[in-house]
Image: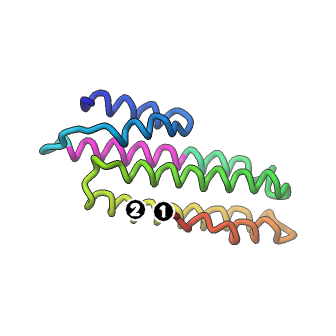
Amino acid sequence: MTYYEWINCFDKLKTGPRDEELLNHLYTSTIELDGNILYRFIKHINDLIRTRLKQSLDSMLSKLETIYHDNNALSLEIINIKKELAFAKKITKLPVIPKENQNKFSETLQNFANEINETLEISVEGMDTTGEAITMIKNSKINVLED
């Protein structure tokens, strides 16, 4: 695939739903990453991941005030965040990304997962009078990224 095709795929992934089929296609594709092309490529991946995760977190935070008392709805939102983190992790493990950059992405992703977990705990703390929502969030282990 050309650089242009890769960037188009990243744009589709950035704005669209989780597309496992497209991601699987990227896993089998190759690209030469010489010179500053690698830097720009990594920058696009970073932007893709940050955008997806920020949108997921913002969506959940906007719904949190109305769903914190509904265990089923809260559980579904937690599952969605975990799926989004898992999808982001798959993106960071693309074979064309050098190992060094994959490791940096993993660290960054773990830090973001920790921030998401902390943000959700803090956000629900003031609303949750029964303690059920905060317990669900703490027990969900959002920040535990599995391989």
Q: Residue furthest left?
A: 35
Residue occupying the point 48% across, 62% down:
147
Mark before the other along the chain sequence, 2 or 1: 2
Local crowd size for mark 1, using a 10 Å CA cut-off: few (<14), some (14–19), many (≥20): few
What is the span of residues highlighted in magenta in the rendered image?
38-54
What kind of residue is marked 1? Asp
Under circle 1, the secondary element is loop
Q: Is residue 35 left or right of residue 51?
A: left
> Which one is nearer the viewer's eye here, 48 or 87?
87
Principal SS element in the magenta part?
helix
Q: In terms of image quadrants, where is residue 133?
A: bottom right
Disc 2: which residue: 106
In the figure, 22 relative to 69: above or below? above
> Which one is nearer the viewer's eye here, 92 or 58?
92
Under circle 2, the secondary element is helix
Residue occupying the point 76% across, 55% down:
74
Disc 1: which residue: 147
> Which one is nearer the viewer's eye here, 129 or 13?
13
